[in-house]
Image (cartoon, rainbow, N blue to C red):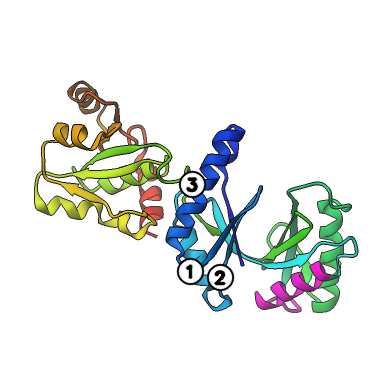
Amino acid sequence: MIIVRHGEIYTKSDYVRHQMISRLSNNLRKALPGCRVVSRKWRIEVHCPKRLEKLCEQKAARVFGVASTSAVRVVRATSLLHAIKTAALLNASKSGLKKGMSFAVRTKRLTKEFPKDSMAINREVGEFIRRRTGAAVDLEHPDVQVFIEVYGGKAYVFSKQEAGPGGLPLGSAGRMLLLLEDDNTALAGWLMLKRGAKLICAFKRKEQKGQAAPLRGWAIPAPLLFFKRPEEEVIRWKKCLGVITSTRSPRKFADMCKRFEVPAYAPLIGLSDKRLRELRQKLLK
């Protein structure tokens, strides 16, 4: 099984949060056909065949709104911790932990009904792994980490997290027009996809269509639409709520704000060259 974490969504009101989690769950179903997606209060669970876990984990991590994913072992959470200790030892061994190496156990209780706190679980599970493997505990620079999340009467044990794009679920912010202008176009579109926007692309020359190619590697339920028409016409025809530009020039952006009837967005303005390189690496990963 895979657990999916969503970060920013939890800053929203109860009603908005419920709507966004529902949208995110639907987007995951589209990205992972054949898998059963179950929305819980704290996490979204993806049930898939064991042989496909790694692939599904990677695909889920390319869905907008997902903060991170993990393939987990699920055990019943009891105060004696027997099942949790065994699952943690299996995960540590699978990660290659052996004598002469170091490890750390990191527990998070998402709900507080479990009788033991996170520190107590860390101590007991860590001591169990230390005795069985002969490995040393190192909380600062461990060779292997074992994570435990406890909620809803169960413990979810894992050793790795696959980082997602974060942000908001795709489709929660309406339709936007992305202007295909230069090599930074895909990055500007990607940042607005993280804000929940649906993209429609406008271009003037056929070769410009390739500027949006990096976006195809991400989980976008509907194919990108491309139109070789005047931008104003596409905005009215498709009822776009805004225009996205990749410009980093405040003067050009100010001119664009005057040109269109809808709001203009320039997500790259103010970003340093170093930050652009970092974001481009995430886009192309």
Q: Is residue 88 magenta?
A: yes
- Secondary element under disc 1, as helix, strand or loop, is loop
- Secondary element under disc 3, as helix, strand or loop, is helix
Q: Is residue 220 left or right of residue 18?
A: left
Front-most of 241 and 179? 241
Q: Are marks 2 and 1 in contact (CB under 8 Å)?
A: yes
Q: Is residue 258 magenta?
A: no
Which is the main secondary structure of the residues drawn in magenta?
helix
Q: Position of residue 30 (x, y in %)?
A: 43, 59
Dividing the picture into quadrants, the one containing residue 120 is bottom right
Q: Position of residue 218 (x, y in %)?
A: 37, 57
Gap in Å between the C-alphas at discs 3 and 1? Answer: 18 Å
Q: Residues within 10 Å of mark 2 (few under 14, many from 20)?
A: some
Which mark is drawn over residue 23? 3
- Secondary element under disc 2, as helix, strand or loop, is loop
Front-most of 241 and 120? 241
Q: Is residue 184 visible?
A: no
- The residue that appears at 25% across and 44% down in the rendered structure is 200
Q: Residues within 10 Å of mark 1 (few under 14, many from 20)?
A: few
Which mark is drawn over residue 34? 1
Q: Is residue 182 left or right of residue 274?
A: left
User: Hey, which residue is sitting farthest top in the picture?
Assistant: 258
Which mark is drawn over residue 215? none
Q: Amino acid at mark 2?
A: Cys
- The residue that appears at 28% across and 55% down in the rendered structure is 223
**Which stretch appears magenta?**
83-100
